[in-house]
Image (cartoon, rainbow, N blue to C red):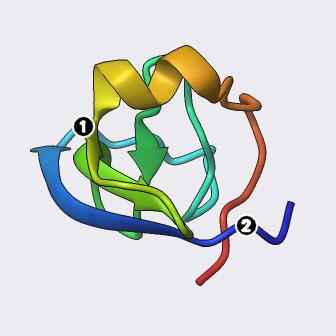
Amino acid sequence: NNEKIKIFSAQTSNEDSNNRSAGEILNEEMWIQCGKGQIRPTLLRRAGKNKVNIEEFLLGFKPEIGKILTT
């Protein structure tokens, strides 16, 4: 939705999802497909807001599963 979100730290996974596009939100926990493997942000900040951990972030942000994030 044209909102900038900066990721400061993330968990990684080498799990391979061949049928997914890079940048795709995979689930409600906010796992995101990368070119190889996946990431889940653990510390992030929305534009104009303070840094928060992923649990706090997800209280006010519901990820749209299947949506492709862009840089």
- The answer to whether 14 appears left or right of 21 in the picture is left
The residue type indicated by label 1 comes to Glu
Q: Which of 71 and 38 lies nearest the eye of the viewer?
A: 71
Residue found 31% across the figure and 31% down from its top: 54
Residue found 31% across the figure and 63% down from its top: 7
Q: Which of 22 and 65 lies nearest the eye of the viewer?
A: 65
**Secondary structure category for the residue under label 2:** loop
**Vertical position of residue 53 compared to residue 7: above or below:** above
The residue type indicated by label 2 comes to Glu
- The answer to whether 65 appears left or right of 42 in the picture is right
Please state the horizontal and vertical placement of residue 24, each as a whole percent of the image: 62, 50
Label 2 vs 1, first from the N-terminus: 2
Considering every residue shown, the one lying at the far bottom of the view is 71
Question: Label 1: how many residues lie within 10 Å, few (<14), some (14-19) or many (20+)?
Answer: few
Q: Are marks 2 and 1 in contact (CB under 8 Å)?
A: no
User: Which quarter of the figure has residue 11?
Assistant: top left
Considering every residue shown, the one lying at the far right of the view is 1
Q: Which residue is mark 1?
A: 15
**Residue 28 is at least partly visible in this image:** no
Please state the horizontal and vertical placement of residue 58, each as a whole percent of the image: 49, 22
Q: Which of 55 and 38 lies nearest the eye of the viewer?
A: 55
Specify the quadrant that holds the N terminus.
Answer: bottom right
**Secondary structure category for the residue under label 1:** loop
Q: Which of 51 and 38 lies nearest the eye of the viewer?
A: 51
Please state the horizontal and vertical placement of residue 30, each as a whole percent of the image: 46, 31
Q: Which residue is mark 2?
A: 3
Q: Tell me how far mark 2 sits from mark 1, CA to CA.
A: 28 Å
Please state the horizontal and vertical placement of residue 52, each as a whole percent of the image: 28, 41
